Image (cartoon, coloured by chain):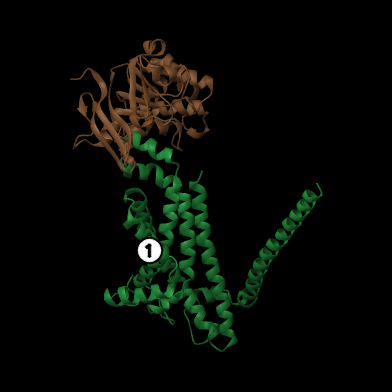
Amino acid sequence: MSYFKIETRNVSLYYGNTQALKNITLGVPENKVVAIIGPSGCGKSTYLRLFNRMNDMIDGVRVEGEVLLNGKNIYADGVRVEDVRKRVGMVFQKPNPFPKSIFENVAYGLRINGVTNKRYIEETVERALRQAALWDEVKDNLKKSALALSGGQQQRLCIARALAVEPSVILMDEPSSALDPISNAKIEELIWELKKKYTILIVTHNMQQAARVSDWTAFFYLGELIEYAETKDLFTNPRNEKTQNYITGRFG
Amino acid sequence: MEHYRRHALKQRLYDTLFQVVALAGLLFAVMVLMWLLYTVFEDGIGRLNKQFLTSFPSRRAEEAGILAGMVGSVLVVLLTIVIAVPLGIGAAIYLEEYGRKNWFSRFIELNIANLAGVPSIVYGLLGLGLFVRWMQLDRSLIAGALTLSLLIMPVIIISAREALRSVPPGIREASFAMGATRWQTIWHHLLPISFPSILTGIILAVSRAIGETAPLITIGALTFVTFLPDDLRSPFTILPIQIFNWISRPQAAFHENAAAGIIVLLCITLLLNATAIYLRNRFSR
C-alpha cells in the first residue's frame, strides 16, 4: 500500500508530438489539500485531469508512467474509466450545473448508478448540499432550475453534485477564479471543511489562495515539476530560483 | 472635416437604400404568397365540404373527393417520420459522439451534405429499384415511406449533428466527470438539451416530405384509388398526385377540386408544423 492517496510515478503526457508533462512524480497524502501553482500553459490542468482520465477525451493524447489511486494504476488494462470517475470527483473552473433542477443536479450521480430508492436519494441530496454549505440557501427551492442560482451558488452546487456519490478524492480546477471575492471566501472555507473527509488536489492561479487552503504546494513550469514542498516552506523559503521568481511575481 | 461629413452622408444614404431594397424583397415575397393563397381559396373554398373530404375520386367532378389522397399523405408522412427520425438522430449521434474524427468520417460527412442536395426524382429511382423491385415491396405505402425517409434523412442528420454540437462543452465534461457513460450523457443531457433544435430540423424535413410528388410517382403511387390502405403493403395515393391529376383534366370543375385539394394539403402541413412547434416550445423551457 502506498503512503499517498493519489500519486503519479514518472508520468509524461503528449498531445500528439508536443510533450505537455515531463516525467512527473508527485503524491497527495490522504485528507490533505495539495495546490498546484504555475503560469498559464504549464500543464497544471492537464496534470489534474490525469486522475479522472478526462484527458482521454481529447484525440491524440498519450500517457506514459503510472497514475495511482489507492496504490492501483488507473491507466492499467481492464480499468473502467467510469469507475475511476465515480471515486474521483471534479469541480471545474466555470460552474457547469446541468440545466435541470437543483435537486436533479445533485441526484444525477446516484441516478446514473442505478439508485432508485427515493428516500435514499432525498437524504443524499440533503447531505451533499449541507456539506457544500448550500442547503440553507436552497432548501425551499430544490425544484428551481440550477441556472437561476448565482455563480457562487452554482459552483457550490457543482461541489455538492460531486460529493453526492461520496468520492474519496476531489479535483478542483481553479474553482473560484470565475467568482466574486465573497463566493471565493466561501469556497475556501468549504475546502477546509471538506479536507476532513476528502483528499483534495486543487489547481489555482491565485497564490494567496494556494497559501490559504493547501497543506502542500507544487510549482509547475513548462510541464515540469519544479518544486514540491509544504505550503508554508514553499512560500517563505523556496529552494528553486524559478519558484522564487514566480511567487515574487517576477514572471508568470 | 468636410471629407468625413460627406462620407457619413454617403453611408447613411446607402443604409436607407439597402433598407428599401430589403423591404421591397420582403413585400414581393409576401404578395406573391398572398396572391397564390387568394386564387386557391377563391377557386377551392366552395368545394371544401364534407362530401369532398369523405369521398373517393370519381369520373364526375362533383362526386369526387380527396379522402384517399388525404389519408395516404398522412399515413406516408407518419410512417416516414417513424422511420427517418430515429435513424437520422441515431446516425447523427454516432457521427458526433462515438465516431472517430478521421478522413473516413469527413468523407461520410461530405456525402451526407451532398445527399441533401440530390434531386428528389433520383431518390424515386432509387426507391423503385431498391424497395419496389429488389425488396419486392411493390407500389406500397411502406415502399413510399422508405423512399421519402431516404430523401429527408440527410436533412435530419445534418440538423441533429448541428444541434448536438451546440450543446455547451461544460455539460459533457460535467457528466463524464461524474462517471456517466457516453450513452448516459447522451440520454440525460445531450438529447434533451438539443431536442428543440433537432425538432426544427425535423419540421423542415417533414414539410418537404409531405409536398414531394416526383419520387412517389416514380415508385408508382396510383392516381385513381377508391379504397383506403389497410396495411403497409397496400397501394396508395397522396395529395399532390391527386391534385396534379385533377389539374391536368380539361373540365373547370376538376380545377376547383384541385384548388380545394391544395387547401387541404396546406392545412395538413400547417397542422404538422404547429404540432412540432408546440412540442419544441414545451421542451425548450
**Kind of residue indicated by mark 1:** Asn
Q: Residue at x 48, y 78 (%)?
A: B242
Q: Which chain is brown?
A: A
B198 or A178: nearer the viewer: A178
Which residue does the numbered mark 1 point to in the structure image? Answer: B111
Q: Position of residue B45 (x, y in %)?
A: 62, 74
B43 or B6: nearer the viewer: B6
**Residue A50 visible in the snapshot:** no
A177 or A84: nearer the viewer: A177
- Mark 1: few/some/many CA within 10 Å (<14, 14-19, 20+): few
What is the chain letter for disc 1? B
Picture mark count: 1
Residue B181: name its quadrant: top left
Relative to B95, say whether A155 is above or below.
Answer: above
Chain B: give its colour.
Answer: green
* Direction right: furthest residue: B2
Q: Position of residue B222 (x, y in %)?
A: 41, 80
Q: Position of residue B7 (x, y in %)?
A: 76, 52
A76 or A133: nearer the viewer: A76
| Residue B213 relative to residue B179: left or right | right
Q: Quadrant of the N terminus of chain A?
A: top left
